[in-house]
């Protein structure tokens, strides 16, 4: 039987030291909802688990004039209760709410969802649409990585040995900016996305879109930024022509697979529909701002 060594450090420096100096394969446990399941396939391998939930800054969420600094181990149950955060990033909070059941929400985190690097992760497109930056720290110092560059493949990320995700920094939205995230699942709840789309957009006082960012998920090995979809929206009043063009751009950008949950053609179609609906919802939210 394999041996498991568990540490729960209380400082970031201690966590980095444990990972960097480990003589065993090391895994960071942000929430553990994915890791515990994955470990069932690792029963023959000794390993080190570093639980970061006892590090105060890893479970904090600070909102100020610069934006949101989100601890990657903050559980989704606490994040989704923050009405001040939801007011600025409703799509991101809604994406976090979609991770698992009520019980899972008490452990699962946005940072864990990101580092797990599933193509179907709900929070990754929402983070990308909001321009989130990963603050990575390790024995060689600190570096900043856009979320769209953090995930490098299925179950893979850009972290080097001795590095860990220390925080997520999400900039303060421009005035009259809102976001939305939508996904399609075969069931009504507690399923993973067949396709997902996140849109953040800014409207001026006349209802013209002046800025936009579109990201799609579950339709390629990693979440995809779709610049052509954003271009279709910018300069428009989100009329039929603009929305149709944005949907088509998202469908064209998708590179899905066929499996028992959906064919290539189905996923491409659905991600276009979701992009259109997410853009419409984000615009409605801007219109509701006072």
Image (tube, rainbow, N blue to C red):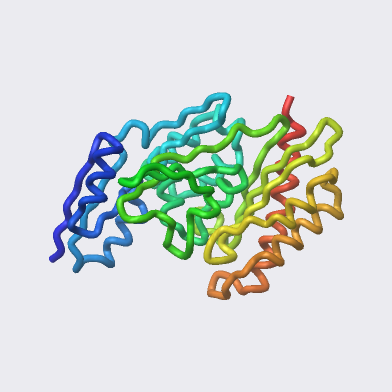
Left or right for 160, reference 218: left
Number of on-image labels: 0
Residue found at x 71% / y 36%:
285
Q: Nearer the viewer, residue 18 or 43?
A: 18
Going 75% across and 59% down the picture, which residue do you hit? 247
| Quadrant in which the N terminus appears | bottom left
Residue at x-position 55% and y-position 46%:
127
Query: What residue is at 55 percent from the left and 70 percent from the top?
Result: 261
Pinpoint residue 134: horizontal percent, then vertical percent. 47, 44
Quadrant in which the C terminus is drawn: top right
Q: For residue 3, which quarter of the picture?
A: bottom left
Q: Nearer the viewer, residue 286 or 137?
A: 137
Left or right of 59, for residue 147? right
x and y percentages locating residue 161 in the rendered image: 32, 55
Q: Residue 163, can we see it?
A: yes
Vertical placement of 232 versus 10: above or below? below
Asked whether the viewer can see residue 105, the reply is no
**Quarter assignment of residue 216:** bottom right
Residue 265 spot, x, y in % from top left: 67, 73
Residue 141 position (above or below residue 82) = below
Nearest the eye: 281 or 64: 64
Q: Is residue 274 shown left or right of residue 217?
A: right
Instruction: List the single residue furthest toward the front.
Output: 140
């Amino acid at each position: 039987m394999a041996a498991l060594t568990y540490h729960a450090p209380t400082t970031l420096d201690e966590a980095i030291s444990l990972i960097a100096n480990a003589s065993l394969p090391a895994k960071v446990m942000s929430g553990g909802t994915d890791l515990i399941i994955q470990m069932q396939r690792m029963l023959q391998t000794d390993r080190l688990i570093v639980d970061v939930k006892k590090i105060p800054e890893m479970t904090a969420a600070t909102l100020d004039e610069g934006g949101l600094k989100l601890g990657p181990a903050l559980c989704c149950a606490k994040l989704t209760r923050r009405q001040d955060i939801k007011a600025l990033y409703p799509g991101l909070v809604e994406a976090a709410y979609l991770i698992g059941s009520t019980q899972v929400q008490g452990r699962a985190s946005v940072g864990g969802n990101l580092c797990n690097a599933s193509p179907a992760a709900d929070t990754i497109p929402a983070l990308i649409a909001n321009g989130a930056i990963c603050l990575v720290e390790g024995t060689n110092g600190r570096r900043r990585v856009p979320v769209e560059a953090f995930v490098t493949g299925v179950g893979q990320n850009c972290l080097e040995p001795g590095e860990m995700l220390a925080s997520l920094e999400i900039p303060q939205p421009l005035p009259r900016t809102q976001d939305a995230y939508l996904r399609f699942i075969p069931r009504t709840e507690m399923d993973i996305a067949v396709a997902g789309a996140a849109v953040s957009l800014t409207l001026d006082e006349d209802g013209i879109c002046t800025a936009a960012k579109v990201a799609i998920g579950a339709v390629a090995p990693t979440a995809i930024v779709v610049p052509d979809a954003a271009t279709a929206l910018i300069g428009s009043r989100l009329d039929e022509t603009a929305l149709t063009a944005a949907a088509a751009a998202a469908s064209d950008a998708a590179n899905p697979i066929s499996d028992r949950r959906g064919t290539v053609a189905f996923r491409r179609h659905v991600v276009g529909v979701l992009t259109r609906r997410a853009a419409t919802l984000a615009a409605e939210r801007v219109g509701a701002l006072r």
